[in-house]
Every structure is written in C-alpha cells, then in structure tokens.
Image (tube, rainbow, N blue to C red):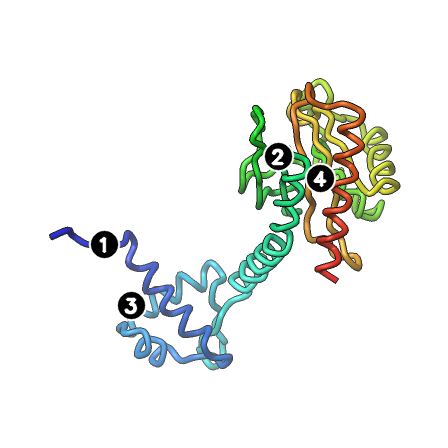
Amino acid sequence: MAQTKQPYGSVLIKADHILEFLSRDNNPQRLSDIAKQTNLTNPTALKILNTLLLIGYVQKDPDTKMFSLGPRLIKYANKSLHQISIKQIAQPHLEHLQKVTTETVHLGIYELDQIKYISKIESKKPVSLYSEIGKSIPLYCSAMGKAVLADFTDEQIQEYLKRNPLIKKTENTIVTEAQLYREIEKAREQAYAFDDGEHDYEVFCIGSSITVNGKNYGAISVSLPKYRLTDQLLDDLINHILICKTNIIEELR
C-alpha cells in the first residue's frame, strides 16, 4: 500500500486553520474561541498567534486582547486579487495578440519600481528571451516599464529616478535622465514604448500600459529577436498591440 506523503511544516497548516477561522467572521475573536474552533490547545494557539502577530498577519486589540486579521495579510490579498483579475481579463486578448503577431507576448504589473511578468505566451519561432513569469525587470530599460513611466507625473518620475540609478545593462541602455525623459515623452504621445536591445541586446520589444481613469493595471508587450524586425513588421506590431490594449481597457471600464 502506498504511503500518504505527510506535509512539511504542520504548524503552517494550523496557522492556516486559525486564519481561516478569523476570516469567517468580521468580529475579533478570543483566544479560547480560536483554540476551540481550530482544535488546538490554548498554549499552541497562542504561540501561533504571536508569530502571526509578529509578521502582521493578525492584529490584537490591546484592551480586549482579541484577535482579527492583520493589515499585511489584507495587503497581500488585495494584490493577489489585482493580479488575478487583470490576468484573467487580459489573457484571451494576449492569446489573440500572440496569434496575429506570432511573436512572444507578455503581461506585466508595476511592483516595487519594477515590472513583474505575470503572463507570457511564447512564440513558436526560434527565439531565446530572458523573460519568465515571476521575474522583475527595471522600468527604465524595458518597453513595458517605459510605457508605465509615461503614465507617471513628472514629480513621480523624479522620485523614481532618486530611488533608481540608471545602470547600463547593454550598449543600448539609457543611462542619462535627459534621454529617458525624451523616451517617456514619445511614449506619452504614441501610447507605446520601445526597448531596443536595452535590457537584452538581441531583443526588441514594444510595450503599452494599461491605465484606466488614472489607475495602472500593468502593461503588455510583444518581444522578438532584433534580426527579424523590419519596418513593415514594426508597423504591424504597433497596430496589433494598440488594438489589444484598447480591448483590454474596454473590459476594465
């Protein structure tokens, strides 16, 4: 008879039971009730709650000594919902974009001064790209990043530049603020931005941001090896990515 694999870290499962119980009621809960409802002893429940308190997953009222979900957990939940919703809405449009362009298509979100890939549809053509889901890249040397920067105010861009030095990734990387501002102005006028071998020397990328009523939901891009790029292909890719952007935005309104 095959043995059932035991999960590693049973304390995490107990913590999950506590968080599940706290999430079912809007009211703060007493330690004794939490322990009873999760089949734990009071000392065990208290140890786990103290750890959850330390990392902000629960909070404790200093007067009543009662526990409720903490702000850090809520922040992660909101971010997760944001990522899931934009990915679910964009995915069919990204699939169509990949079909009509036959090149690699990405969806990324702005996070911690970078673009984080949350969806990627590979080209069937021979290509080797640096991108992978979950990886983050700088704003200043990526098409999606520059497109997102174009939706920032000038003051927000200045604050971004204070936090992020322009580090050379390739021979083509923009390393002066004046040049970056020129790129951002172009992106504001055109509604798309280029990465011309600025992060990966062999790769050309076109990106456009998804912003509705001042709220940014991320950005989309099409990437391909530079040797395949022609003027006609570039015009076609721009047209297709702007159509894709428009269709996604229509669903977000």
Distance from disc 4 to disc 3, alpha carbons, whole Å, reads: 46 Å
Return the residue at label 2.
Answer: 104
Q: Is residue 105 above or below residue 126?
A: below
Image position of 120 (left or right of 206): left
Distance from disc 2 to disc 3, alpha carbons, whole Å, reads: 50 Å
Q: At label 4, which amino acid type do we have?
A: Gly
Q: Which mark is residue 89?
A: none
Disc 1 secondary structure class: loop
Residue occupying image coordinates x 77% and y 29% = 234
Determine crowd level at label 1: few under 14, some 14-19, many 20+ residues with C-alpha closer than 10 A.
Answer: few
Determine crowd level at label 4: few under 14, some 14-19, many 20+ residues with C-alpha closer than 10 A.
Answer: many
Point out the tag, 1 or 4, that comes first from the N-terminus: 1
Which quadrant is the C terminus positioned in?
bottom right
Q: Is residue 186 above or below residue 66?
A: above
> Which mark is in front, 4 or 2?
2
Return the residue at label 3.
Answer: 44
Return the residue at label 4.
Answer: 145
The residue lying furthest to the left in this view is: 1
Image position of 173 (left or right of 78): right
Q: Is residue 226 above or below residue 223?
A: above
Q: At label 3, which amino acid type do we have?
A: Thr
Instruction: State the image coordinates of residue 116 (x, y, percent, origin top left).
Output: 60, 43
Q: At label 1, which amino acid type do we have?
A: Gln
Determine crowd level at label 2: few under 14, some 14-19, many 20+ residues with C-alpha closer than 10 A.
Answer: many
